[in-house]
Every structure is written in C-alpha cells, then in structure tokens.
Image: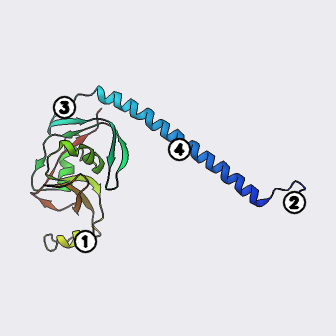
Amino acid sequence: MSNGTPVPGRTVVLWLGVGAIALLLAFWWVFERAIEMSAVERAISASLAPEISTATGAMRLVPAGKFMAGEDPVPVNLPAFYISVRTVKADLSFLDAKRFCEAAGQRLPTTIEWEKAFETVPSDEEWVDEPHKPKEFELRSFGGSLTPPASLDEPWSTVRGGAGARRTDYTSAPVRYASPAIAFRCAMTPR
C-alpha cells in the first residue's frame, strides 16, 4: 500500500481524531458561553428588586446563578426568577393551581426553580410544574380516593416539600387530584 492509497485503519483513526477535536472545541465554546451568560444574568439580577408586589401577593427574587440540584447533585445555572412568598393553600388540583397562576400572568415554578428556592420557602407540600410518571406505590396510594381510579395513563405532576422534607424529596399525583394538604405558589420570570 505504498502507492499512495490510504490505509483504511489510518483513515478511521484520523477521522476519529478530527471528530474528537471538533467535539472538544464545541464543549469549550458552550462552556465559555455559559460563563459569559451567567455573568450577564448576575448583572441583571443585581438590578432587580429583591421583592415585588403582585396580584397574587408578594414575590421574592431568587437571583441567577449556579446551585447543586437533584438527588445526585449536579451544578445547574438558573436565570433569576420571582417566587411567591406565601403559598396558596386550598383544595385545588394541579390544573386549578396552574390556571390560578396563569390568570395572574404568572406560572407554577418548575421543579428546579422550586429546589433553588427551597431555603426560602415554607415546608408545605406544593405542586410544581413537572410532568411525572408515577411509581407503582404512588399509584397504589391513591387506591379508591379518585373516581375513576388513578391510572398510569393519565397525566401526573410532582409534589415537592412537606414537613421534614429534604430539598430533593418529591412524590407525584394525578393532575386532577385535589387535597387541602397540597399548596402551591406562583413563579414569574422578570421582564
């Protein structure tokens, strides 16, 4: 194969090397952009009011920045957002809570936003906007409390918090389930 014809194994190795370099450059670019973006977001956070008054009550700023999220903590960079200081405690389903927040031009917090705000929120059980597939024991726990009975095929959402709960504790419930034990709070992206 000395007649100038490329050796197939060498060509594959060459292309793998080029691909690896391209992948490293892409990761570097994304990482650099994330650092730039977080600096911009921190500057924006610094210009926002620490608390605002809205139709649903007082909302507290959760500043932009990184925090360790999840069961197996990983760093997450989250933009600034506002979250209600007080929970709304009523016999409302996830769907009712979502409609309430939307009617006020707000939304339910995502699970990651709720986790970041955990240190400043009370210990009520709360609906968060995270579709969730239930575990078998969660399905069984609803037993005969819903008509028709709860199923794995219907939409479920996440409930976070509760007395003695850790930041990463959660359960799930059908979005139609309502209980006076489950509260909610609204969130809002700064404009």
- Give the residue number, with chain letter if any, for mark 2: 1
Element marked by disc 4 = helix
Which quadrant of the figure has residue 56? top left
Q: Tell me which residue sits at (27%, 63%) in the image.
A: 155
Element marked by disc 3 = strand
User: Which of pointers 4 and 1 lies earlier in the amino acid sequence?
Assistant: 4
- Give the residue number, with chain letter if any, for mark 3: 51
Three-letter amino acid code at disc 4?
Answer: Phe
User: Which of pointers 3 and 1 lies earlier in the amino acid sequence?
Assistant: 3
Q: Are marks 3 and 1 in contact (CB under 8 Å)?
A: no
User: Which of pointers 3 and 2 lies earlier in the amino acid sequence?
Assistant: 2
- As drawn, the residue found furthest toward the right would be 3
- Give the residue number, with chain letter if any, for mark 1: 151
**Neighbour class for label 1 at 10 Å: few (<14), some, many (≥20)?**
some
Three-letter amino acid code at disc 1?
Answer: Ser
Relative to residue 167, is residue 41 drawn left or right? right
Relative to residue 54, is residue 154 drawn left or right? right
Q: Nearer the viewer, mark 3 or mark 1?
A: 3
Mark on residue 27? 4
Which quadrant of the figure has residue 134? bottom left
